[in-house]
Amino acid sequence: MKFLVTEDCGRLARWLRLLGFDAVWIRDAPVTECYRRAYNERRVIVTRNRRLRASDLFHVVHLTSATLEEQLRQLVNDLKLALDDERLFTRCDRCNVPVKPIEKTAVKDRIPPYVFEHQAQFYTCPSCQRIYWAATHWDRVKQLLARVNPAPRPNGRGRGENPSGHCAIPPRPDPALSRKGGASVGRGESAKRANRLTGHA
Ligand SMILES: [Zn+2]
């Protein structure tokens, strides 16, 4: 499932990317451009803007909350959205493109020595060249996802109407992301939050 997220939901757009979804973030665009792109690219429009209307040609989710957790919960419930742990951190949260594995030796000069010493797997964004590796704030991601979409209880009466919709976080080192050493990673509160989330310096 692909998304078109409007200007008022930028933090959600980045989180959808962290969760592995293709999510474009539209800013300063007329409503008709949102419609055109949603239709042409088969994207679900996610917005808090009531001027955006549903259509037979594309789906619109009007978010009712301003908080990230509630917004994710609404998407999971309204769209039966599957939060697949295999897709977590597979996409650059800045560029919305899939990251690719990169040899450890190729990033040695671009990451802190401690990271090089303790991490085995690295990924890079082919667009912005940022380097991704396992971060220490992964638990925060797990905790949020568990609150948004808890796994079904053993008696099968959990929230997970979608059979693959529960978030089964594996007990393994998980890739998170970091940035190319020394580079600016963005401005504003959403960027700061993302940095905390992903263990950026
Ligand atoms: Zn990127």
Image (cartoon, rainbow, N blue to C red):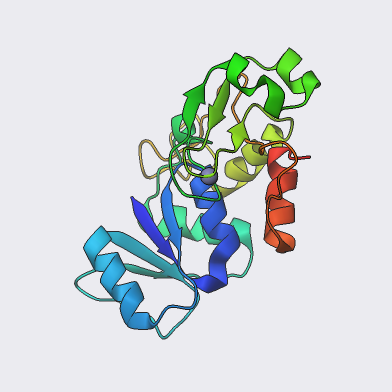
Q: Position of residue 36 (x, y in %)?
A: 27, 72
Q: Which residue is depicted at the point 80% across and 20% down?
A: 114
**Furthest residue in direction left, as rendered:** 56
Residue 57 sits in quarter: bottom left
Q: Position of residue 73 (x, y in %)?
A: 52, 55
Q: Nearer the viewer, residue 123 or 39?
A: 123
**Furthest residue in direction bottom, as rendered:** 51
Q: Position of residue 159 (x, y in %)?
A: 47, 45
Q: Which residue is depicted at the point 24% across and 76% down?
A: 55
Q: Relative to 105, is 85 above or below?
A: below
Side (left or right) of 152 relative to 54: right
Q: Relative to 85, is 62 above or below?
A: below
Q: How many badges with numbers are in the image?
A: 0
Q: Nearer the viewer, residue 109 or 140?
A: 109
Q: Nearer the viewer, residue 136 or 98?
A: 98
Residue 50 sits in quarter: bottom left
In which quadrant is the C terminus drawn? top right
Residue 174 sits in quarter: top right
Side (left or right) of 186 relative to 106: right
Q: Relative to 162, is 124 above or below?
A: above
